[in-house]
Amino acid sequence: MDDARRSRERSRVAVAGASGLIGGALVRSLTADGHEVVRLVRHRPRSADEVRWDPEAGRVDTAGLTGCDAVVNLAGAGVGDHRWTDDYKTRIRSSRVHGTTALAEAVASMEQPPRVFLNGSAIGFYGETGDHPVDEEAPAGEGFLPSVCQEWEAAAAPARHAGVRTVFARTGLVVARGGGAWGRLLPALPGRTRRAAGRRLAVLVVRVPARRGGRAPAPPGPRGPVRPLQPDGPAPGDQP
């Protein structure tokens, strides 16, 4: 591929939550594919690929998002990192709702907003379903996590109302040696299962249209909830 074509197909993607397990993997993947990645950070930017934001205060440096084809928001306090005290449950909720609101309003305010706003969510949206299969059309469940996920997704309304294609990635448990909900369980698994699980990681794939000398209308693509999960995976009691 010649340099001119590579330049046309290069996209600029902003990522909030880039230091997290999925966010870090996404940044590495996009960078390896030759895309330009800017990371939203809370400290004063130390390099050209950092953009400052303060999700709790609702502030985003929208100038740093100029030219972005997609904005990805994966920020939020870890649900498996601490005991769920009342204070930490408040942090789980506020870190997601406030961050999403700040980015959605920032995107909506831009003269040339990104084509795609991909926001995090989780299969916790459905609550406890037992053996009953659910899909993207299933209603929300009841309880703490379903209520958080509903508020989390609703907070993206400003971007959606501004005409930006808005997608919610309802992720599940992440299998990775380096962390995630299953990362703490790997040492307790049988050797064969541990080696297989340690090589797997749920990674979000962000597809944005290539640049072709201007900002053409956004092509069709998914909107609303999607579930980046392995379909028909083994049940907990299945043999590896």
Image (tube, rainbow, N blue to C red):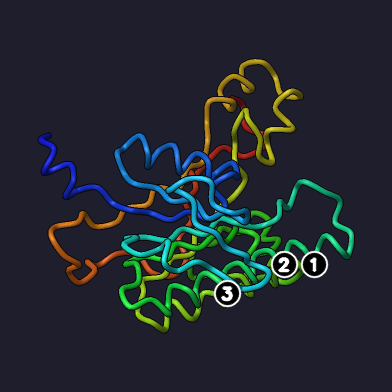
Residue type at numbered disc 3: Thr
Q: Earlier in the sequence, mark 3 or mark 1?
A: 1
Q: Residue 93 carries which label?
A: 2
**How many numbered circles are shown?**
3
Q: What residue do we see at 48% from left, 43% from top? A: 230
Mark 2–mark 1 Cα distance, whole angstroms, equals 5 Å
Q: Position of residue 71 (x, y in %)?
A: 42, 61
Q: Is residue 118 above or below residue 207?
A: below
Compared with residue 151, is residue 54 higher up or lower down, i.e. above or below?
A: above
Answer yes or no: do the residues labelled 2 and 1 have beta carbons within 8 Å? yes
Q: Distance between the residues labelled 3 and 1?
A: 16 Å
Q: Which residue is drawn at 50% across and 63% down?
A: 119
Residue at 60% across / 58% down in the picture? 123
Is residue 125 toward the left or the right of residue 24 in the image?
A: right
**Residue 139 percent location from the top left of the image:** 58, 73
Tell me the crowding category of disc 1: few under 14, some 14 to 19, or many 20 or more residues within 10 angstroms, Cα based.
few
Q: Is residue 63 left or right of residue 216?
A: right
Front: mark 2 or 3: 3
Identify which residue, 227 or 81, lies in the foreground.
81
Dividing the picture into quadrants, the one containing residue 4 is: top left
Instruction: Tell which of 96 and 167 is nearer to you.
Output: 96
Quadrant of the rendering where the N terminus is positioned: top left
Give the residue at x 24% y 47%: 10
